[in-house]
Amino acid sequence: MRILGGRFKGRDLPTLTGDGCRPAMAKVREALFNMLAARGLQVEGARVLDVFAGTGSLGFECLSRGARFAHFVEFNKTLARRIADNARMLGLAPREYSAVTSDALKLLSRPPVQPFDLIFVDPPYGRDLLAPVLDLISAKHWLAPDGLLVAEVEKALTPQTWPASLELETDRLYGQTRILIWTPANPASPSTPEPSTP
């Protein structure tokens, strides 16, 4: 896994193979961060939550680009250890990150100490986890009022409903990957999501 931008740009981090390990491809990560920048997100200084973190590619990309803190949540113990090892390899200070081995639904069922400016959700394919995760993020107020919530899911998954507190702003296809971006809903100014593209 190669980091694409920021202070660690060009650094290669060891990854693992196997079930549940699906690092975001470089071209998808690059497109995603371009979309976030276009929406005015300031990664620098942001608090980032990486749910179903896998290799931690999205969280590490944010830390490289100046995020203040990244919280990695990964159920697989081996992957969680790899995230912690890579953080140490990059020389990150303990105050800059935390990597926990936890079931995402269990963790999200409790409110956070402080909301996050940017949340990534990359659930395992075919397990119908996106909807309950969105419900918990909304119900427990994990997303900051001006934050962004990003989901990376399989192409075939097109959510029809989501919590009223979230407004779908973007729905884009990159090969077999679908990128969805929500913002906190503003009832006074509803918007239409960008169309999906092949």
Image (cartoon, rainbow, N blue to C red):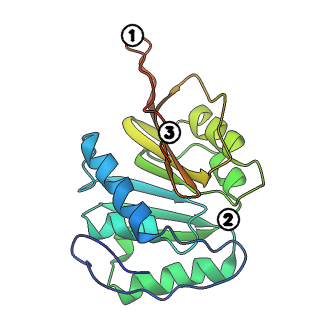
Residue 160, quarter of picture: top right
Q: Quick one: SS at disc 1?
A: loop
Which residue position holds label 2?
102
How far is disc 3 from disc 2 in space, using C-alphas?
Answer: 33 Å
Q: Position of residue 128 (x, y in %)?
A: 76, 48
- Please give left or right for residue 56 compared with residue 93 in the image: right
Closer to the camera in the image, 129 or 76: 129
| Residue type at numbered disc 2 | Ser
How far is disc 2 from disc 1 in space, using C-alphas?
Answer: 37 Å
Picture residue at 41% right of the left edge, 20% below the top: 191
Q: Is residue 189 above or below residue 60?
A: above
Q: Quick one: SS at disc 3?
A: loop
C-beta proximity under 8 Å, tags 3 and 2: no
Which residue position holds label 1?
188
Which residue position holds label 3?
196
Q: Position of residue 125 (x, y in %)?
A: 71, 58
Picture residue at 65% right of the left edge, 36% below the top: 159
Q: Position of residue 194 (x, y in %)?
A: 42, 32
Q: Quick one: SS at disc 2?
A: loop
